[in-house]
Structures are given as structure tokens and as C-alpha cells.
Amino acid sequence: MTQTVNADPAELAKFSDLAHRWWDLDGEFKPLHRINPLRLAWLAGMAPLKGKRVLDIGCGGGILADAMARQGADVLGIDLAAKPLKVAQLHALDAQTEGVSYREVSAEDLAAEQPESFDVVTCMEMLEHVPDPSSVVHACSQLVKPGGWVFFSTLNRNPKSFAFAIVGAEYILNLLPRGTHEYDKLIRPSELVGWCRSNGLSLQATKGMEYNPFTQRYWLSGDTSVNYLLATQKT
Ligand code: SAH
């Protein structure tokens, strides 16, 4: 049986090729390490994690999944790139993180297998790498329990985000490898909110994520023009 998988092999290869660098705090994934405490505190403030069943979609090497498990959640991290998942598993062993496991499965397939099973679903910095992001939003809505939380983060699409997130971050500041993000795949908040609404996920909070290249500091703000996060709840 041929099945269409909602994934771009070239995108998965980009992340697999860099997998061994995932837990290098000063490597290619430094921005994810730096923003992790901010996004974790923000989402855990709305959806306390202790004792909760949590799914992290597009978990990569497990930076967020591992941190959520350390807050007492029972976390499953899923991704379609095999190497980052291996790295995530090895890291959990190495760091002796309890309550985290990883699986190579798509959000869509897991939704068919385990509908309404998770108290919290996170899908961070992933939608902009997928051919059909609305299908992932649909799967998130199927996976979360009624009343549960789904959190997204991604990159806005406008001239400023092109200048900051692609030209600035990839070509001037070398914060990210060149080619990490493609402009056409970036997602406006209005688009993402629209997919959420049509899938029964109601918007609870929006935040922007800003970066100052001089102080190298990240912080959450009301400015969603470049990086942003959405908190939604299944009604
Ligand atoms: N969410 C993590 C990693 C972000 S990097 C974090 O924020 O720390 C983007 C991740 O999305 C990579 O691990 C990549 O392999 C994964 N990805 C890309 N396309 C995917 C797809 N179709 N299904 C699942 N994961 C995907």
C-alpha cells in the first residue's frame, strides 16, 4: 500500500545530518537551547505538566521533550527523522531523564492510533518544515483530550521576518545554518489561527519571541512579527 506521508525528505535530511550536534549548547541548535527555558515556562504556566501525558511533535533531539519530562510529565516525543530521535534517546539515557520516550511516527498516524490521549501537545518550530501544516494541526486536535492544550511555535511570513529570520539569522549572524528556513513555507499567525479554529482549537494566548543580537538575549513579548507562539485549547 502506498501512503502519502506529510513530510519533505529534504527537510528531514537537513535535521538528520546535524543530529550529532543537537546537544551542543554552542552548535547549530544553540537558538533552540536558548529559547527553551522561555517557551517551557510560558506553556507550563498555562498547562502545569506534573503527572500529565504530553506529546511533543517534531521533537528532534528532544530539547523540549526532555525538559518537560524533568518537570514531571510523561512525555512521548515523535519525529520522522531517525537520527535526531536516536540522539534524543541517547541523551535521555545519558542524562538519566525519567518519563520520556521517543518514536518515529507521523502526527497523522499517531492520531489514528491514539485519539484524544494527551493532556498537552506541543509542536514547536516544526510546521514551517512540513508540506501540509494544516494536516498537522488537524492531527494535534485529534490527539489532545477535550479541554487539553495544544501549543505551537513557528515563524511569521512578511518582509521583516524575511530580513530577520532568514537574511539576519542565517546569512549575517550565522545563528542558524543557511537554508534552515524557506520563505514560502513560513506561516502567518492568521493562517495558523484559522487552521486551529476550523479544527476545534480555540486561541487562548499569543506571544512573540524577540532577539537582540548585541546582548544575545531572547525574550517573550507582544511582537509576533518574526517568531511567535500560540496557546490553544480543544473545546
Ligand atoms: N521541536 C524541536 C525541534 C525543532 S527542529 C524544538 O523546537 O526543539 C524541526 C524538527 O521537525 C526536526 O527534528 C525535523 O526532523 C522535524 N520534522 C520535519 N518535518 C517533520 C514531519 N513531517 N513530521 C515530524 N517531524 C518533522
Image (tube, rainbow, N blue to C red):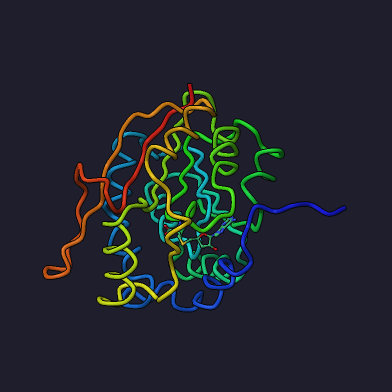
- The residue closer to the viewer here, 43 or 159, is 159
Q: Residue furthest front?
A: 159
Left or right of 4? Residue 100 is left
Q: Quadrant of residue 144?
A: top right
- The residue closer to the viewer here, 71 or 161, is 161
Residue shown at 45% from the left, 37% from the top: 150
Residue shown at 59% from the left, 54% from the top: 131
Q: Quadrant of residue 143?
A: top right
Left or right of 164? Residue 140 is right
- The residue closer to the viewer here, 134 or 116, is 134
Task: Say above or below: 185 vs 107.
Answer: below
Instruction: Please state the horizontal and vertical placement of residue 123, each as a whole percent of the image.
Output: 47, 48
Q: Quadrant of residue 48?
A: top left
Left or right of 225? Residue 231 is right
Q: Residue furthest top?
A: 235
Residue shown at 40% from the left, 76% from the top: 178
Left or right of 58? Residue 106 is right
- The residue closer to the viewer here, 67 or 208, is 208
Task: Say above or below: 121 vs 172.
Answer: above
